[in-house]
Image (cartoon, rainbow, N blue to C red):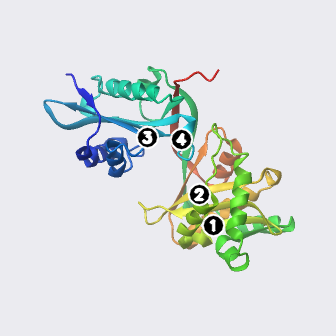
Amino acid sequence: MSCSIRRPMIKDAEEVVSLSREIADRYHVENADDWVKACEHQDVYKRYFVAVHDQTPGIIGYACVRPDIPRQPGLGKYRLLLGVKPEWRNKGVGHKLLEAISHELHGMQAAAVRVRLAESKDIGFFTKRGFDEYERMLRLQADIAQCDVSGLSSLLDEQASKGIVISTLEAELKYAPDCFRKLYEFEQELFTIWPTIDPVVPMSYEAFRDQLNRLQDVHDGYFIAKDGAAYIGCSYVMRKDSEPYGLVQGLTGVLRRYQRRGIATALKYCTMQYARQHGFHSIETASLSHNEPMLAVQRKAGFTLMEAEVRLEKRLISSE
């Protein structure tokens, strides 16, 4: 049975978002506004297509691309979201959608197209079409009731004996009016050693400040390691919108000259004690599979693997 591929119309928006959430789980189209903007050509970096069949009501598949690194769209690396209704799979629909998107990307002089998939999904569709794995993200979870944080006090004493004190953002706001700026400068230094394939593109200070303000209900769950007045490490948690008793781990990191001293472990234990004291049941986090030092910290703190996210890339322009 054949299908046709066309560009989206405004009326498609809600249907596509609903289909995407139904079949793609974590890897879905965010909202209908993106589709409306695409139809009105308001975003030059995004492209969308839908698959339809004359004898089947509604949309049977979709494909869209957007910059993989939103703060640096000019790099030419795009993230692909592609979905097909289960009853239409293995009938060429996905192949046609991918062809349409690929043709569009060539016209945009894109350098590469990327896709993220749960490890349990069949990635053969993409590897047969020139995609190769470039990294893997591990998603982990800690069951707070099962985690032993009884050693936190001794960890904090050990750090204090070395001149390292762990504070919270809530406390720093009372005594250090410039703490937002200090945290921003700390993160900029930290990201220069972050173990990612692509360079980390820093956000502006204003965007960073706004992000911290949005976390104000968990400022006491934002832990900062200090050497004197200098910020040298941090770990924080955020509320999980979909689970009232769940938290999501934000950034955990320590400056290179302070690494391998147990500071990250102490920070991680602080977030887990915070979760227990405030009645939360779990914390989710993620680490790149090649970041073995952080994975060791996660395992020591009681995190276990939930799933692996496979990241694939197809080069469109030679890097030579």
Q: Which mark is residue 44?
A: 3
Q: Amino acid at mark 3?
A: Val
Q: Amino acid at mark 2?
A: Gly
Between the residue at mark 2 and the residue at mark 1, the CA separation in whole angstroms equals: 9 Å
Between the residue at mark 2 and the residue at mark 4, the CA separation in whole angstroms equals: 24 Å
Q: Which residue is mark 1?
A: 222
Along the polypeptide, which appears first: circle 3 or circle 2?
A: 3
Q: Are marks 1 and 3 in contact (CB under 8 Å)?
A: no
Q: Are marks 2 and 1 in contact (CB under 8 Å)?
A: yes
Residue pictured at 41% horizontal, 29% vertical: 122
Q: Residues within 10 Å of mark 3 (few under 14, many from 20)?
A: few
Along the polypeptide, which appears first: circle 1 or circle 4?
A: 4
Residue pictured at 65% horizontal, 46% vertical: 295
Q: 197 left or right of 155?
A: left
Tell which of 237 and 303 is nearer to you.
Answer: 237
What SS does tag 4 mark?
helix
Vertical comparison of 268 with 160: above or below: above
Along the polypeptide, which appears first: circle 2 or circle 1?
A: 1
Q: Where residue 20 appears, x then y in whole percent?
A: 33, 43
Is residue 258 in view from this perspective?
yes
